Image (cartoon, rainbow, N blue to C red):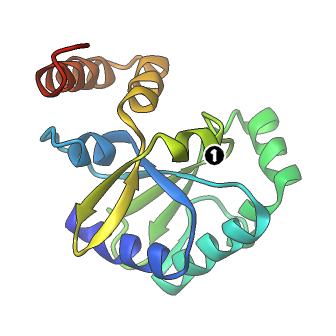
Amino acid sequence: MTPYKDIFLALNRAKVRYLVAGGVAVNLHQITRATVDLDLIVHLEKENVLRFVGVMKDLGFVPKVPVAPEDFSDEEKRNSWIIEKNMVVFSFVNAVNQVEVVDVFVREPVPFEEAYGRRKDAEAFGTVVPVLGIEDLLSLKTAAGRDKDLYDIKLLRKKHEQEDPSN
């Protein structure tokens, strides 16, 4: 997760509204799990997305597909990618270190405002990182249904039950 420290710090400085999802979210819910990419849900309001894109560009990230990074802020283009390419995430890769990948959902998999209200604020890297709340994370993992997601669900539920035995 250390490679993503600069991303979290820069997103917070730029006041980008986002939530961490995927394997990094599992880690930030204190379940140790190897992961490479960073999955984000960015509030898809145009100005917010443009701030996000600006941060990615400033940090040396470029789109994995051959389009202008600002195209991600265009709702019509995102919708066409969903329909024509069956796209779920738009990937940014570090131009210098292509192992660093940031996948951003092209549509909010849960209504952003609602999920943001249920978020977990995790202290990491000297900043607060907004992470999908446990129920939203479990819901996304269930929808993905891959073996690693099903294993994450098992670990997250076990940890959650230990923390809150009333559930």
Q: Which residue is mark 1?
A: 113
Residue 104 visible from this viewpoint: yes
Q: Is residue 128 above or below residue 96?
A: above
Q: Quadrant of residue 32?
A: top left
Residue at 30%, 48% (x, y): give it: 24
In this image, 15 relative to 28: left or right? Answer: right
Residue 87 found in image quarter: top right
SS label for mark 1: helix
Q: Is 165 placed above or below 35 here?
A: above
Across and down, in percent, residue 99 comes to 32, 62
Q: Residue at x 45, y 58 (%)?
A: 102
Which residue is farthest right?
Answer: 76
Identify the image quadrant of the N terminus.
Answer: bottom left
Task: Give the answer, above or below, for where 104 lies relative to 92.
Answer: above
- In the picture, measured across the screen, residue 31 lies left or right of residue 93, that is left
Going by the numbered disc 1, the residue's amino acid type is Glu
Position of 33 relative to 122 (above/below):
above
Furthest residue in direction bottom, as rendered? 58
Q: Is residue 68 visible?
A: no
Question: Farthest residue toward the top?
Answer: 167
The residue located at (70%, 73%) in the rendering is: 50
Q: Residue at x 48, y 52 (%)?
A: 19
Number of dots carrying numbers: 1
Residue 120: x and y in percent read 36, 47
Q: Nearer the viewer, residue 105 or 128?
A: 128
Q: Residues within 10 Å of mark 1 (few under 14, many from 20)?
A: few
